[in-house]
Amino acid sequence: MGQYTVIRHRPVVVCFQQTFIKKALSIMYDINENKSIPIDLAIRAFDVLTLIIAGEVASAIHFHSYLEQTSTIHSILLYLCSFLAFLGFEKAGIYRSWRGILPSKMLLNIAMAWGVVLLIGLFFSFLIHRSNEVSRLWLFYWFIVGASLVIAMRILLHTILRHFRKKGFNRKRVVIVGYGAIGQEMHMRAEAQNWFGYEVVAVYAEEKDREILSSTTVIKLTSLDDLPSFVESNHINEIWIALSIDASIQPQKLQYLLRSVLVDIRWVPDMLSIRMLSNDMVDFLGFPTIDLNRPILSGFNGILKELFDRMFALTVLILLSPLLIGIAIGIKRDSPGSIFFKQYRHGLNGKLFSVYKFRTMKPHVASAELIQAKKDDDRITPFGKFMRRTSLDELPQFINVLFGDMSIVGPRPHALQHNNFYKNQIDLYMLRHRVKPGITGWAQIHGLRGETDTLAKMAERVQFDLYYIRHWSFWMDIRIIVWTAFKGWTGSNAY
């Protein structure tokens, strides 16, 4: 009888452990997803307590005493800012679900929201004419300690949830509607990034995509009419609508079928089918709008780059003026003709401008058909070969930069004949002109300079140019300039 009792107790203990774990995870789930008002208030109160403790720690670091022993304004700010954090952190999205969102974004939100709260507190001290009594260094310590403690608690909670989600707990059951490129990508990410806790249970695919779906183990839905009943009977938590642009499903029909479904529904726009320069969501005339070909180099970024370009070009022209004069003399002594070579190019948004170069060829009658310079080209003068090999013939383009037609870094400007030919041969070719052309560029420092005698060479150069436009940063420009200065002026392809 005793042996029977022991055997019977073990499943009870295991069941109790599983129930306890599920309950604990449920509580953490509620905290993380803002499902329970009491728990939500509790976590917000805990954040306030953490910030108050952080203020006292900052006082101990800076004043070597309790905060109440310092100027009264510090205690006022302690409770005022903590109260503002209680109200304002929710508006900053700090208590929304982390599921499916990169943790770095949430942590950055915490730091920014806390910084704004402290600035409001400092402004309040100015309004009551007590700002001169506030220790800025104490505020700085409070910002660092407060943000660190709140972030540390979020990281701990997130780490625990990630661990248990990998084990199969606290998962959300999902149905994907549409299995084109975007649906397949969403499915792959849900499986690969299992710490987010999404389990794709079923997929509805149109007939043309069902062959791809046959290799997966998920349930295959063949009729949208079955979707509402399937969601209810299989405890589905979310529906992801990932229809491709050419899908035959009518949105009105889908909306009608899901009108009574009481689960979260997400629509994932098919941006993989239209990949140009960008896919930023913006508010335009009160409507959510996706900008497809707006480069990063607009707005403040464009102003920053413009100022840098003009100052850099002016500095270079002044410092290199003796060299420029020497080159001009060399050109005159080498062959008769003008010092500069001018030719029209497409600039920003296709606007025509005259690009300046030092002349490297003998004077000749230009033909309607563009003939690129080739190796051992007899049109090139002896001094011109040296200039082309060292890229010294490009130096007058700093004048173009000073005039605002070009940039220091950007896609190289091609001849008009090239643009007219390649725009119909290479996808997205003309998007190179959404930014100013440059003296040097991302393609050039990777060896893609000189003659482009094949379609493949030009296509590769365009891919590098588009990569630069999509991923531009100020430091990327600096890197390209430094690389060009040390290794980019010469090359076997320059002739």
Image (tube, rainbow, N blue to C red):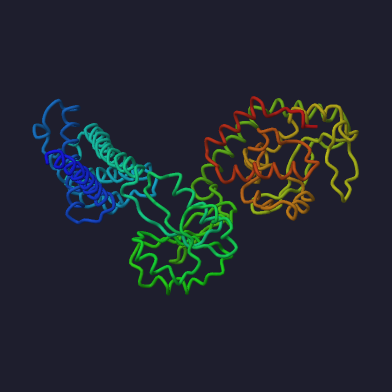
Please give left or right for residue 242 compared with residue 326 in the image.
Answer: left
Q: Can I make out residue 125 in this image?
A: no
**Residue 484 vertical position relative to residue 175 in the rendered view, above or below:** above
Q: Quadrant of residue 439?
A: top right
**Residue 385 vertical position relative to residue 418 in the rendered view, above or below:** above
224 or 315, nearer to the observer:
224
Report the residue that reaches farthest toward the left.
Answer: 69
394 or 371, nearer to the observer:
371
Where residue 271 sits: x, y (%)? 54, 56
Please give left or right for residue 336 compared with residue 111 in the image.
Answer: right
In which quadrant is the N terminus drawn?
top left
Where residue 62 sits: x, y (%)? 19, 27
Q: In which quarter of the image is residue 13?
A: top left
Where residue 173 sits: x, y (%)? 37, 56
Where residue 269 sits: x, y (%)? 50, 60
10 or 180, nearer to the observer:
10
**Residue 1 vertical position relative to residue 206 in the rendered view, above or below:** above
Please give left or right for residue 104 compared with residue 14 in the image.
Answer: right
Q: Which residue is drawn at 55% across and 58% down?
A: 180
Q: Which residue is drawn at 49% across and 69% down?
A: 223
Q: Which residue is drawn at 19% across and 37% down?
A: 132
In which quadrant is the C terminus drawn?
top right
Report the residue that reaches farthest toward the front.
Answer: 1
Numbered marks: total: 0
Q: Quadrant of residue 306?
A: top right
Q: Can I make out residue 36 in this image?
A: yes
